[in-house]
Structures are given as C-alpha cells and as structure tokens.
Amino acid sequence: MNILTKSLTGLGLGAALALSATGAMASGSGCGTFVNSKGVTEHLACSKAPIDFTNKGSLQNGAKMFLNYCAGCHSAQYVRYSRIAQDLEIPPELVEKYLMVTTDQIGDHINAEVDPEVQASWFGAAPPDLSLETRLRGDDWVYTYLLSFYEDPSRPWGANNLVLKNAAMPHVLHNLQEELSKEEFESEVGDLVNFMAWMAEPARHDRKVYGFFVILFLLILLIPVYLLNKEYWKDIK
C-alpha cells in the first residue's frame, strides 16, 4: 500500500484514535471502505498482523515503540511496568531506566500524564485507553489502521486515514516511516501491535497452549470411558 504523508508538527508522541469510528471492525467486513482516485468506493481488506507472543524480541521492541510513541497521550491503565519486565523478560533496571516514561515506580500502571480535558481541546476528544484496544477492534484492524495514513492538507494535522476517515490522531509514526524502508516500517508497526495484543490479554498464548492439551486429554480420556461404558452395560443388554 502506498502511504503518502507530510511532516506533522506538534506532538511527536502518541495521540488519539477517534471515538466515533465510521469504518467497519476487523471482525466485520474488512477494514472499512475508501473512495479511490476515480471516485469509486472500494473495500479495504485488513492486513494480517504478525502476532506472536513467543517472539520476545518483537514484544520488547513493541513495548519500546508504545512507550515512546503512544504513552505520551494514551494510557494503558490495566498494565503495570513490573508486568512488562516480568512477562517480556526485560531486567527491571532497564525498564526503570528506558521505559518508565510516566512514573518512577515500577509497580505503577501506564497512565498518560496529560490532562484529558487539554487533550480533548487538541483533538476534539480525549485519547482512549489502549489496554484493550486490540480486543475491541481486532489485531488486524489496528495494524492496518497504523499503516493507512496518507497526506491530507485539509485535516488539522495534515494527514487522514483510509481505515478511519477523519481520525483525530495525527500520523505520529511519520518520521519513523520516512527513515525506514516499507518492509522495515511494517515490521516496526507489527511489533507495536504485537505488544498491544499482549497488553490486551497477556495469557492469550498460554490459554491456547493449555486449551490444546485439555482437548487432547479429553480425547484420550474418551477411550477408557467408552470401554468402561461398554463393559458396564454388556450384561444388561
């Protein structure tokens, strides 16, 4: 996807997803619609987000991305810095030194330090908490959204979005996008969304692993239960 952007001034950190979404959710019909250069409405297919909770390097880089580009305006009130250190296998001293941008206590939650009322005056709506954003909209939706900014001089921040038309959020990853190749930028955004998916449900990978073994155990248990049932009823029949 060709994504045209122009230099944005002002924040340089994370900002707000618009609260009044007009695009379809990832669980529905793709990632919304857009009007092409010929004036024809087209459906936008969601790109597949590279979610992999076993890739600690991706999650660690995603944490760095989130805390550098998003935590300035967005909170993640259900996530503690100490949980990031524990689950993502980052030494606590490194978390305290490089990742704790909103507090000086490692046991604290990630809470934006900017007054929501001030943010609302900037963007028209206070930025939402992102703890559960990927569960609300879907991993692929968030991934596609972050890759779909384009230049639009008519917008206050100079950019618009194919997935969420007239989104209040500026293209905060613009400078990073210009520095990297298309593949490198998509990889960085993929790491960010991977971390956001982990924030929304840290036990997601474990749940799937445990679920597999539970189902396997029940299938194996079915064999002796069937034979026992057959043995129990053979004289009665």
Image: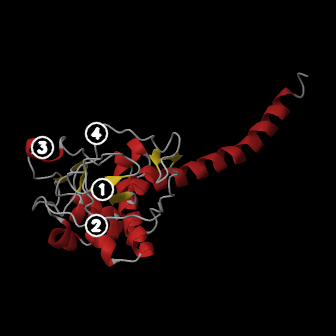
- Toward the front, the furthest residue is 38
Three-letter amino acid code at the position of disc 1: Asp
For mark 3, what is the residue?
116
* Circle 4: element type: loop
Q: Circle 1 is placed at which residue position? A: 152
Pinpoint residue 217: horizontal percent, then vertical percent. 65, 48
Work out whether residue 89 can be spotted.
no
Q: Is residue 50 something one can see in this rendering?
A: yes
Q: Which residue in the structure is indicated by mark 2?
A: 174
Residue drawn 37% across and 69% down?
Answer: 188
The C terminus: image quadrant: top right
The first of marks 1 and 2 along the sequence is: 1
Residue at horizontal 74%, vertical 38%? 225
Whether residue 212 is situated above or below residue 174 in the rendered picture = above
Give me the C-alpha separation between circle 1 and circle 2: 13 Å
Q: Earlier in the sequence, mark 1 or mark 4?
A: 4
Residues at marks 2 and 3, CA–CA distance in whole angstroms: 24 Å
Give the labeled residue for mark 4. 19
Cα–Cα gap, marks 4 and 3: 14 Å
Q: Nearer the viewer, mark 1 or mark 2?
A: 1
The label nearer to you, 1 versus 3, is: 1
Answer with mark 2 or mark 3, whichever residue precedes in sequence: 3
Label 1 vs label 4, nearer the camera: 1
Residue drawn at the location 70% of the way across and 45% of the way down = 219
Q: What amino acid is found at the position of numbered circle 2 in the picture?
A: His
Q: Is residue 112 left or right of residue 197?
A: left
Label 1 vs label 3: CA separation? 26 Å
Which one is earlier in the sequence, the residue at label 1 or at label 3? 3
Q: Quick one: label 2, few (<14), some, or many (20+) residues within 10 Å?
A: some
Decide which of 98, 10 is in the foreground and name it.
10
Q: Secondary structure at mark 2?
A: helix
Q: Position of residue 224 (x, y in %)?
A: 76, 42
